[in-house]
Image (spheres, rainbow, N blue to C red):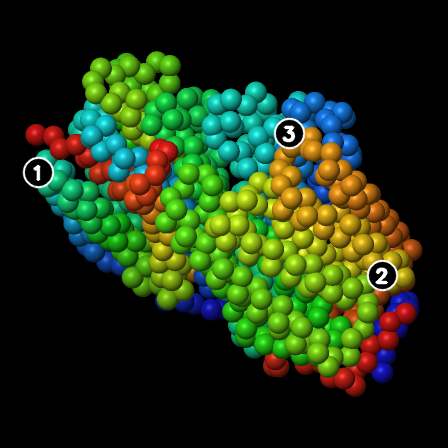
Amino acid sequence: MTHTTHHIEPQKIYFGVFGALMVFTAVTVWASMVDLGPLSIVVALVIAVCKALLVVLFFMHVRYSRPLTQIVVAGGVLWLIILLVLTLSDYFSRGWLPAPAGW
Amino acid sequence: MAEHHSALAHQFDDLTQQWDASTFGMWVFLVTEIMFFGGLFAGYAVYRSAYPDAFAEGSLHLSLALGGTNTVILIASSLTMALGVRAAQLGDNRATAWWLIATLGLGSAFLVIKVFEYHHKYVEHLIPGPGFLFEGPHARQVEMMFCFYFAMTGMHALHMVVGAGLLIYFILQARANRYSPDYFGPVEVMGLYWHFVDIVWIFLFPLLYLIGHRR
Amino acid sequence: MSTARAEPRAEAPADYLNVDYGIRSWLLTKDHKRIALLYLASITFFFALGGAFAVALRLELITPAGDLMQPETYNKMFTMHGVMMIFFFLIPAVPAVLGNFLVPLMVGARDLAFPRINLLSWYIYVIGGLFTLYAVVAGGVDTGWTFYTPYSSTYSNTHVIATAVGVFILGFSSILTGLNFIVTIHKMRAPGLTWFRLPLFIWAHYATSLIQILGTPVVAIAIVLVGLERLFRIGIFDPALGGDPVLFQHLFWFYSHPAVYIMILPSMGVISELVTCFARKKIFGYGFIAGSSVAIAVLGFLVWGHHMFVSGQSIYAGMVFSVLSFLVAIPSAIKVFNWTATLYRGSIVYTTPMLYAFGFIGLFTIGGLTGLFLATLATDVHLHDTYFVVAHFHYIMVGGAIMGYLGGIHFWWPKISGRLYPEGWGRFSALVLFVGFNLTFFPQFILGYLGMPRRYHVYPEEFQVLNVMSSAGASILGIGYLIPMVYLIWSMRYGKRAPANPWGAKGLEWETTSPPPTTNFEKTPVVTEEPYIYSHEEELEVG
């Protein structure tokens, strides 16, 4: 019978990650109350990405998973970025032409 | 000599291959979920960049208290879920069941609060459609913001409901002592799904509730 | 040395077809081979239905005036033709029938990674089909298969929701098939079967599965949003709320362009198998073909805006999409070069599958080249929404994908059914199809650049001759499809019994019986050599 030794995370790591996520949540709420102008969306997204990374790496065990799993996660995120960037590139460049852009 | 564990499916050679294939399969499925929600995020990005003031205005009409509470609840449910998977890895079926019950409880609390929130929006005439009423500038674009609020949180809530249903199944399995250090894959796969739904909310919270800055 | 003699059997050993009888054993099966046949039956049904709608269209277009049906009815005909053919036939055809049957066999596995999910995917297909069928009998839908807003979300009075639900549900079937293939190919290959020893059919299905996973969810959400707008006035595309109907097109085409690669890549995988076997020669440029499959899948996601050049999309985005669209043609061309190089100095045998392969190579090339005119911004302004586009995609989808599908059905028919089909009839129908196809669709290129718009039930008098040619061709094409249906079914009962390897082909699927046993192999095979080691000494005699 084959036995794989799966990495078993100590409980305190999970609690620690939870604590970090709470801190990040408080920070993001606080940051939203400060007028950062166009930076506020950037800050909010950076914090959200940090929180997501903590969940992915620790709660979802990606830290200890095969490279294939990590590639799959990265690939999914990359494809989301392709969707966002190419779609937004249309909207952001519509105003560049002097002729009426329609929308 | 391969031992035929009762949980080993015929197409797999051993439980390791089965665990490997199952978790990989769930990750591939989660990629489809990233792209599914991704379409909503793409639309959100287009309209928020076009109507920043309207989106900020709409955001102020969402309850930060309820949204924030829900965020804490959902992250806590990810903690309990992760601890449940860990218990299954150790073969502690009792602990697994209790951690999953806690997860189910927290998830249900989230959904109850969502019902309250949606009800508030109904009372305030902020549900898009013929009943929408907003006194203020950019009323139509504020309505658009609420289109995204309901589409995104609604789709998320739907995923939570599915997750809750699945949790019930796994709780029953744990109570029937199904899991062991050799066979805990299904709980881990459930955990992956639950954490993903949490991550979606981690993005929804700032993008919907924290747009306009409140003092 | 002939390997094509049928071996007489003393008694039929247990295989996946005779191991169990009765409808429950089919409807509750977990065997990927039976599920493939369930799919074969259902997609053939939808193909026939989609073909019936095409008949209606071509009948109307025999005359310039709109004298056969109301304009609204015509709109419903082309919509249902597109929806049935694309979602319920072309997307599943090769993967769900040939892929389901062959992927486990080709990787040396007992089944796919998730057999119950495989069966579920078929039931999901059927349920999606039922919703769409309901829409048809309840009065049809007239938005075009592209469901553009605001017509689909606000103004159409036809059964948009039912059709949208049907397509949405079907998307899950596609996703689950792709998921199963990806996991199977990664995790269940036989010992010794490294990635570069895999058949090119597997590489093609792997690339296809990547597209199914990454693209389908986006059209799913697009459809959901149209439904929400129609039902609940959640107006994400509604200009009254500041919405942009073109956003729907972005979300729709993000999937629907890669979808055309879902439809062609599996057939390309079939062609690779056919060409190497019937030229009796190792495929030329294995690595290039494998790499091109993945390249097509990846690049295919970067070009969707070429469907939107005249939609109001920004010119700058249009230019980017145009350049990327040229790039995506390159890996397809690489494949055609490699197949051609394989044929060069090969010992070619003109079997039915090989005839389909030749048809594919020629017709796909024409279809692909005409795509370049459409990828070019300036010419597309004139060609968009004309019959040039219609001809372009039918050359690829019918001249390409369907010929590949039929070639594959014939090639693996002995393995699937345990019987040989009548070779004479096979070759005859392939020729009938080729003639009928070209007569139907070549005139449409001319009609298109002369300016005849697509989706119109009327046209100027001067276009009539070409339209009549096209409709005449369609009748020949129809006959070409009917004949194989008849003789393939006939062969299941009366065909000569097939040996394990009637073609003398290389590949793990040929190392087990025809038909295979339920668990595919007596013993898990071990792979020790490269694929496609054909030698000229093993000449193939075909009866």
Residue count near mark 1 (Cα–Cα under 10 Å), binned few <14, some 14–19, many ≥20: few
> Which image quadrant: the C terminus of chain A?
top left
Q: Secondary structure at mark 2?
A: helix
Using the rendered image, report if marks 2 and 3 lie on a common chain: yes
Q: Secondary structure at mark 1?
A: loop
- Measure the C-alpha gap from mark 3 to mark 1: 55 Å
Q: Which mark is residue A34?
A: 1
- Measure the C-alpha gap from mark 2 to mark 1: 75 Å
**Residue C187's spot in the image, x, y percent?**
51, 64
Using the rendered image, report if marks 3 and 1 lie on a common chain: no
Q: Residue at x 66, y 76 (%)?
A: C341
In primary-sequence order, the first of circles 2 and 3 is: 3
Closest to the observer: B19 or C80? C80
- Measure the C-alpha gap from mark 2 to mark 3: 36 Å
**Residue B120's spot in the image, x, y percent?**
26, 18
Q: Residue at x 57, y 51 (%)?
A: C260
Q: Quadrant of residue C532?
A: bottom right
Q: Which mark is residue C96?
A: none
Residue type highlighted by circle 2? Arg
Relative placement, left or right, of B97 versus C520 is: left
Residue C23 vertical placement versus B56 (above, below): below
Q: Quick check: marks 3 and 1 in contact, CB under 8 Å?
A: no
Residue count near mark 3 (Cα–Cα under 10 Å), binned few <14, some 14–19, many ≥20: many
**Residue A10's spot in the image, x, y percent?**
23, 58
Q: Which residue is mark 3?
A: C75
Q: Which residue is mark 2?
A: C427
